[in-house]
Image: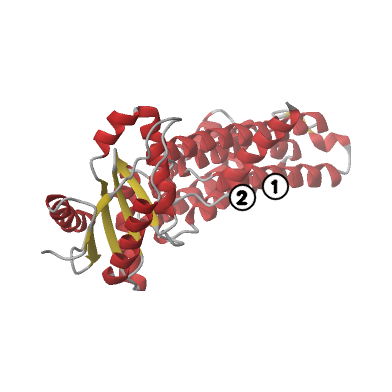
Amino acid sequence: MYGRSTQGYGKVLATLLVRPDEIMLELGAGGELLVARLRAWLSALILLLPLVNAAGGGDVDETVIGLAAAVFVNIMAQVWLVLARGGRRHHWLPFATCTYDISTTTGVLVLLALGDRAAGMNSMVVWCFYLVAIAMTALRNDGRLTLYAGLLSIAQYALLAWTLFATAASPDQLVSVDYGTATVANQGMRLVLLLIMTLLTATIVYRMQRLVELSGRDGLTGLPNRMWLLQQMPHVLDSLRNGGGSLTLVLLDLDRFRLINDEIGHLDGDRAIRHVVALLAQGVHERERLIRLGGEEFVLLLHCPVGSGWERIEQLRRTLYDRPFQPGRGADLQRITFSAGLAAWPQDGADLSALLGSADRRLQACKREGGNRVMARDG
């Protein structure tokens, strides 16, 4: 039991530390923009805090410090908002803004501590912005960012508290009429709260990553699905436009598979699909993709010219024909075949819709000629 729990925690940590896939990064870019807008609104509200403090008879120096900090964070909030509108152009932006949010909170606490040590450690209003900064990482869908934010908050606040305790000339410097007494115990509790918030937010991010992963994966085979293809194809084509290279899209459909499925039953039909996927996957190279659109229809994204793509798919067709599927005990072998239409980028289409249209036209021509064939050009 303990070993399984340890493995489970290790899997969660590994998922959080790995670079998110393209879907998560795209969602994270939208989350960064949302955070930037939220930061701008919160920064505007922060302007009210020193005014409320002054109206309540607060210390003048503290009010001035608060007002100066509020003006600074409002200026920076607008800068981050402009950068966030660039989408994924600035890949470093989430870590930069996270560092800024946390370091700004620490900076304000340092300024408060210059006038009153206890204020630097017991100011609940300012300290809560550590929690806000950690919580907002959930909107970026990146577990690495959440763990970074939590560790940075804990490290900076622990260093601040240790410095203030270590440099206090007497216990009286840790006592304040407005903020009470700063003790090792209450500072320790704040560090524990930061850790709890980090773990809670990391759990939320992990859950979101799993949900997005499942929504972009086929439940039977684990392959990317139609949603993944629609989300990722624009990025695949952008990468080709910027870096060059070839792409062949293959639209592949199993011949008369519904009849086979009815004959051998749905359970063996599912096994047959996995049998086909295992063979097709042998022909997919690194960075290439095998996608299940649904039922018995698949798409392959091959990084090669259409002529080479035709040769590779033709070889897969022969391999599948030569390796029939064995259903349950006593059942006859099932020889499964497929038809495939190929489309080359950009000759046959500049976007996913056009490529699928060209590939489907050739696929249907294969079907009309009896199936079990591969076509890369219009007849």
Q: Residue furthest right?
A: 170
The image quadrant of residue 146 is top right
Number of labelled discs?
2
- In the figure, is residue 184 to the left or right of 131? right
The location of residue 262, given as percent across then percent down, is: 28, 29
**In the drawing, what numbered circle is on residue 156?**
1
Asked if labels 2 and 1 touch by Cβ distance under 8 angstroms, the answer is yes
Query: Which residue occupies the foreground of this view, 104 or 173?
Result: 104
The location of residue 365, given as percent across then percent down, is: 13, 55
Q: Is residue 236 in sight in this rendering?
A: no
Provide the secondary structure element on which disc 1 rests: helix
**In the drawing, what numbered circle is on residue 103?**
2
- Calculate the distance from the C-alpha at mark 1 to the C-alpha at mark 2: 8 Å
Q: Residue furthest bottom?
A: 244
Task: Please state, as top left, top right, bottom left or bottom right, where the N terminus lies in the image.
Answer: top right
In the rendered image of this protein, does residue 317 appear above or below residue 186? below
Residue name at image x 29 percent, y 35 percent: 260
Provide the secondary structure element on which disc 2 rests: helix
The tag earlier along the polypeptide, 1 or 2, is: 2
Amino acid, disc 2? Ser
The image quadrant of residue 38 is top left
**In the drawing, what numbered circle is on residue 371?**
none
Query: Which residue occupies the foreground of this view, 86 or 356?
Result: 356
Q: Is residue 376 in sight in this rendering?
A: yes
In the rendered image of this protein, does residue 261 appear above or below residue 72? above
The location of residue 258, given as percent across then percent down, is: 25, 35
Amino acid, disc 1? Gln
